[in-house]
């Protein structure tokens, strides 16, 4: 139903398995909560409402520990001697946001303790305890400690002040600027709860293509309210800062970062913001990228711009996230190289409260990209990952694509920056280069649709992003399983096939859109559907033909030594692998090489045939996703079952559209027949 659509993975449905349910019933008899902060209140309320659904009865709050089987919640410093005796040094081993869930005894009575160093840790513990029940796990002899590995775990909303969402496919913006600050939509609270349930602790609420108006008092008053709503859930608000704001809303003649008035304007602006929002997170900045203003407009560079803003927020403990998504038509031999060339020379030159935010790949959120060469190349600068959760190039909210598979692939990639094992995960969690400030951002797929994300399964991408932000070493398969159990059902006959379907969905989209390393061949502007033929856009690097370079001789972008030499931006070990067509992974082949249509792949097939088979395989995979889902009616409520069914039907139709369009187009160059087994366009 619409209600189930809305509740995301916090369904808290009655536990179905009677044995498991009666075990939970016997182990949970009351809640004893210590402390009275807003966060502890939120944690207590969540525990109560979660349990009332899962156990189908009201679990009373207790004022003491006289009865048995209590859930005891509270920070370490609020616990009395008798409880503390049950602790070893668990909490000393984890950071401030971590938590401990432990089975304890008090005067021969059994209880479960959820504790942490801070209130927010307790809230995280509560959500994770509820998850145990939601996923039908044992709650006996508990001794779970867990803590996030990355400090800043944030969503980036590309929300405009007029309510539209750039690259948003789930309705309009959640933020109702017209009704704020006095009207607090219940959705703001549920948004915060839901994020807290996966450990997200920051949100940039407005678009990177920024409007300076967000920094005016009229808007800051509204932002202040949102910050207040999010605060009990441990979520800090950040804003994007339009670099030219001093001119647009400050009445200055310049935004030159070296100008004294400009510096002062930002200092005063920071002060004003922090007066309203003492825990304001800081600024996210897109500068000198895709027409946005920036320091280069005044002959200054990224360091000059970032450090000026960093100095403005530093007295208040604020951060500047400076984005590295830059490319221009002036350096158009290979767009993939530009961010690295522009940023790597500045390694070590940014202030301590600047973190450089880098997209996962060097082009732009494609179904598959090799990891961005900046990872590993700036050891003296904290780099933050930017993933896209909204499916700009991946079928919007129409196609089912389980993105944690993609995230995991990137996080596990080995940069070799400090020898073998220097994975991207180790760079962004700070362990490789010993950074204290670490971060990860996901461009949100959330809007005001009833189900928040447009596609019921797109909820899993929000969920999975949060889980990987907490711990980038987790397996996307475990995450998919948890999400399915919490969102739909614990029945094995449902979990197994649907999990398989999710895990395969990412490779399916690669196959039917951009197999073998192809990229950026979506129709331009909106980026939906195939458009490999488009070649008339004003900037060369906006045209799909720029990326696939198909001609009668072959196809692919030569980024090896013989081509743009983008491979040289990777560590020598990695460059060597990508450079050599024999060692280059076939999944990245046409990203790095321009190859003849007759080039033979490892399986002995020629490139043209292999490409055709990949497109067909993508279509087949979507067909089998459909078949799987069609058998699941019994396990899912009618609304969500039908929604997913209709969407998968569209996806199947569009996978064929992609296959037919791309193969017909490329066939003009290859001049070859489609191999047997590949369906002819109808
Ligand atoms: C992509 C996207 C833009 C967005 C940009 C960015 O190019 O199409 O809409 O503004 O990324 O990340 O800044």
Image (cartoon, rainbow, N blue to C red):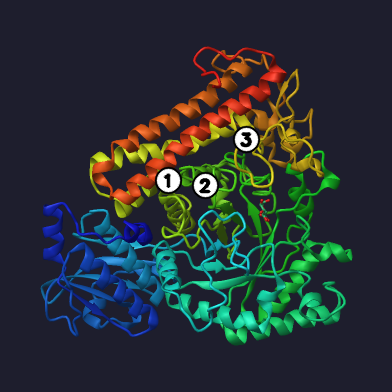
Is 333 left or right of 97, judged from the image as shown?
A: right
State which quadrant residue 310 falls in.
Answer: bottom right
Q: Earlier in the sequence, mark 2 or mark 3?
A: 2
| Secondary structure category for the residue under label 2 | helix
C-alpha distance separating marks 2 and 1: 8 Å
Residue at 69 percent across and 66 percent down: it is 210
Using a 10 Å C-alpha cutoff, classify the residue at mark 3 as few (fewer than 14 neighbours), some (14 to 19) or many (20 or more). Answer: many
Where does label 3 land, which residue? Answer: 530
Instruction: Please state the horizontal and vertical placement of residue 323, each as a whole percent of the image.
Output: 69, 59
Tag 2 and tag 1, C-beta contact below 8 Å: yes
State which quadrant residue 126 falls in.
Answer: bottom left
C-alpha distance separating marks 3 and 1: 28 Å
Name above or below for residue 232 compared with residue 376. below
Q: Earlier in the sequence, mark 3 or mark 1?
A: 1
**Residue 103 visible in the picture:** no
Where does label 1 land, which residue? Answer: 476
Residue at 23 percent across and 54 percent down: it is 137
Name above or below for residue 416 compared with residue 516. below
């Amino acid at each position: 139903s619409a209600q189930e659509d809305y509740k995301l993975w916090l369904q808290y449905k009655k536990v179905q398995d009677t044995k498991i349910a009666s075990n939970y019933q016997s182990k949970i008899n009351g809640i004893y909560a210590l402390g009275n902060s807003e966060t502890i209140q939120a944690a207590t309320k969540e525990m109560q409402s979660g349990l009332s659904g899962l156990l189908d009865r009201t679990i009373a709050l207790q004022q003491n520990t006289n009865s048995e089987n209590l859930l005891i919640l509270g920070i370490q410093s609020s616990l009395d001697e008798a409880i503390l005796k049950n602790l070893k040094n668990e909490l000393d081993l984890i950071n401030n946001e971590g938590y401990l869930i432990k089975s304890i005894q008090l005067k021969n009575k059994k209880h479960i303790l959820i504790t942490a160093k801070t209130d927010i840790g307790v809230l995280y513990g509560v959500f994770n305890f509820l998850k145990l029940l939601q996923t039908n796990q044992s709650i006996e002899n508990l001794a779970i400690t867990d803590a996030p590995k990355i400090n800043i775990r944030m969503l980036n909303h590309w929300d405009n002040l007029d309510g539209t969402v750039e690259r948003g496919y789930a309705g309009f913006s959640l933020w109702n600027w017209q009704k704020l600050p006095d009207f607090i939509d219940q959705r703001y609270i549920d948004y915060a709860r839901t994020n807290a349930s996966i450990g997200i602790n920051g949100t940039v609420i407005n678009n990177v293509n920024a409007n300076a108006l967000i920094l005016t008092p009229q808007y800051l008053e509204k932002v202040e309210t949102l910050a207040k709503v999010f605060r009990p859930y441990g979520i800090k608000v950040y804003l994007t800062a339009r670099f030219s704001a001093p001119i647009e809303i400050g009445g200055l003649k310049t935004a030159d970062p070296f100008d004294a008035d400009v510096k002062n304007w930002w200092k005063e602006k920071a002060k004003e913001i922090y007066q309203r929002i003492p825990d304001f997170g800081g600024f996210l900045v897109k500068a000198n990228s895709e027409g946005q203003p920036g320091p280069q407009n005044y002959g200054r560079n990224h360091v000059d711009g970032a450090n000026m803003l960093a100095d403005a927020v530093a007295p208040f403990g604020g951060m500047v996230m400076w984005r590295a998504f830059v490319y221009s038509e002036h350096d158009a031999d290979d767009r993939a190289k530009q961010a690295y060339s522009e940023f790597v020379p500045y390694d070590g030159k940014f202030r301590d409260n600047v973190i450089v935010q880098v997209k996962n790949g060097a082009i732009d959120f494609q179904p598959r990209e090799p990891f961005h060469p900046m990872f590993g190349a700036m050891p003296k600068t904290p780099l933050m990952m930017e993933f896209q959760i909204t499916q700009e190039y991946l079928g919007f909210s129409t196609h089912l694509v389980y993105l944690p598979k993609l995230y995991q692939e990137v996080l596990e990639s080995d940069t070799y920056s400090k020898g073998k094992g220097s994975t991207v995960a180790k760079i962004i969690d700070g362990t490789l280069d010993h950074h204290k400030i670490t971060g990860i951002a996901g461009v949100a797929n959330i809007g005001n649709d009833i189900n928040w994300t447009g596609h019921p399964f797109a909820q899993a991408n929000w969920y999975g992003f949060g889980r990987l932000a907490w711990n980038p070493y987790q397996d996307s398969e475990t995450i998919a399983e948890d999400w399915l159990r919490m969102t739909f059902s614990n029945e094995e006959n449902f979990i197994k096939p649907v999990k398989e379907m999710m895990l395969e969905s990412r490779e399916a989209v690669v196959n039917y859109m951009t197999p073998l390393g192809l990229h950026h061949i979506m129709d331009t502007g909106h980026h939906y559907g195939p458009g490999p033929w488009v070649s008339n856009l004003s900037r060369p690097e906006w045209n799909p033909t720029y990326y696939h370079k198909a001609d009668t001789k072959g196809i692919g972008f030569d980024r090896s030594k013989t081509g743009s030499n983008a491979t040289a931006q990777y560590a020598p070990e990695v460059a060597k692998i990508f450079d050599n067509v024999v060692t280059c992974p076939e999944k990245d082949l046409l990203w790095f090489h321009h190859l003849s249509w007759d080039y033979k792949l490892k399986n002995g097939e020629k490139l043209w045939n292999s490409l055709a088979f990949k497109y067909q395989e993508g279509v087949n995979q979507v067909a089998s996703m459909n078949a799987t889902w069609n058998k699941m009616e019994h396990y899912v409520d009618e609304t969500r079952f039908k929604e997913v069914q209709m969407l998968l039907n569209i996806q199947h139709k569009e996978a064929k559209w992609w296959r037919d369009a791309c193969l017909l187009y490329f066939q003009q160059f290859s001049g070859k027949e489609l191999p047997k087994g590949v369906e002819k366009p109808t």
